[in-house]
Amino acid sequence: MKNKDEVIVCRCADVKLSEIQELIKDGCTTLDEIKRLSRACMGQCQGKTCRNLIMQELSKAQSVSIEEIKPSRFRPPVVTISLGSLAEEDSHEK
Amino acid sequence: MRIDCDVLIIGGGPAGLCAARSLLGTGLKVLILERDPFLGGQLLKQTHMFFGSKEQYAGTRGFEIGQILTREVQASPNITVMLETVASGYYPEENFILALEKEKKLYQVYFKKVIVATGASEKSLLFEGNDLPGIYGAGAVQTLMNMYGVMPGKDIIMIGSGNIGLIVSYQLLQAGVKVKAILEAAPTVGGYFVHAAKVSRMGIPIFTQTTVKRALGRNALEGVEIVSLDSKWQYVPGTERKWPCDTLCLAVGLSPMSELLWQFQCEMRYVSELGGYVAKRNPFMQTTHPDVYIAGDVSGVEEASSAMLEGTIAGFAVSKALHKMLDSVDQVIQNSQTFLDEMHVGTIGEKIRNGLAKVEVDVCL
């Protein structure tokens, strides 16, 4: 089992495959739940790498096709924006 | 700061550039947002000659097509380009796209129609040690090698025998990198025969029903353990073997970057054949949101030739929708649709055809 720990699913938040599988075993059935509990999909790349991999794990666990997995919300912004940029924009508006 | 335009094009790759070119001379105020410091997108990494017809630049190398399109667009008075600028989100209450320039300056971009041509991102693979330095996506290898002249490694194993895996293997050989083997999980080679034949002639073996099980090495990649797969894609016990290498390249597919389309509340569907979530669209590349059009890999992962055709269709369709059409608009759209259909014929186009059938709808312009 130690070996599995070295499989990285989310590179931004350093989430391992064993952690995702543990969450699924504990009853997570959607990407949203896994996101909130593990922080996978919530880093710099906003899930561009790990979203598909986690959906694959969910589809395997539920024995359904990946098309049937409920998608998570895609809120803006889709890239990181520094607080400084937002503050500057805000001061322009006033 | 506020910016107003008639047509906003998100992404300056093959699809976005062809969309912009279709709007030349319409008098419409067109704005292109491009994330990179230059236009051209993936075309700039493509050193091989294109197929198809004269209209599709057959016989011209990809990066040269990128340069031709860039020149045409830059010479046009009605098209503005913002480089190093990312469309960071769509805000429906105010109906603008928030653009971030050089990771610093924010703009609220207002538009009448938007063409989303954001492209796709690389997929990854789960195996032990998959975060070791020396493991790259094929796009990263192409960027390093073809754009910045940096060799990614000396001794490489390629995962994936789709067109990208095959073409990048060939480019690595040209750059003087030893390509040990191409591994393919499926029972057959994924890419075009011409590309597979080319790498085979150069002596690169392609192993089907084979994948990487483990990356070996402590601080950087030193080798891989590969394994054979059965017809149910499961490891065949006892077939593991270890091969030394300093680089592993993953060419395991692309996934459309469709976040903005979700924010526009376009009707979306996961279509494996097209790489992931794509928006439903009519033959004019218009989504279920009447002001939102799509083109290129974000509408379903294919190749640059189809991206250019889709961009052309979307551009002309938008000019028609804004009543700024040129006389020939219907004919041009129809021609591009015919070319696109021709790309999808036969067994090679079957997968794409099946995928498209799941997202094509009849919404009227």
Image (cartoon, coloured by chain):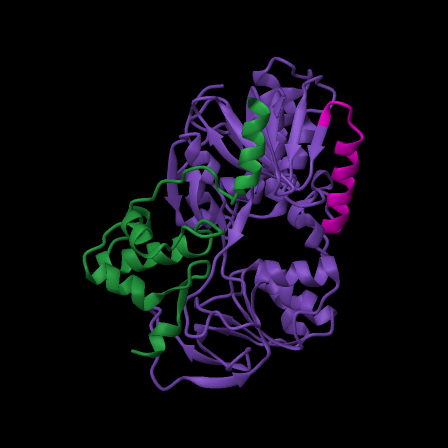
Chain colours: A green, B purple
**Foreground residue, B3 or B67?**
B3
Residue shown at the point (57%, 28%) measured from the top left: A91
Q: Is residue B164 left or right of residue B354?
A: right
Residue B334 seen in render: no
Residue shown at the point (42%, 59%) measured from the top left: A13
Give yes or no for residue B324 being in the magenta stretch: no
Q: Horizontal and vertical percent for residue B214? A: 44, 77
**Foreground residue, B365 or A51?**
A51
Q: Horizontal and vertical percent for residue A68? A: 28, 47
Give yes or no for residue B76 being in the magenta stretch: yes
Q: Which region of the structure is painted magenta?
A: B61-79
**Residue that protrudes farthest toward the left in the picture:** A27
Residue B1 falls in image quadrant: top right
**Foreground residue, B13 or B210?**
B13
Residue shown at the point (57%, 30%) measured from the top left: A89
Q: Horizontal and vertical percent for residue B51? A: 68, 49
Q: Is residue A86 left or right of residue B92?
A: right
Give the main secondary structure, helix, strand or loop, of the magenta stretch. Answer: helix
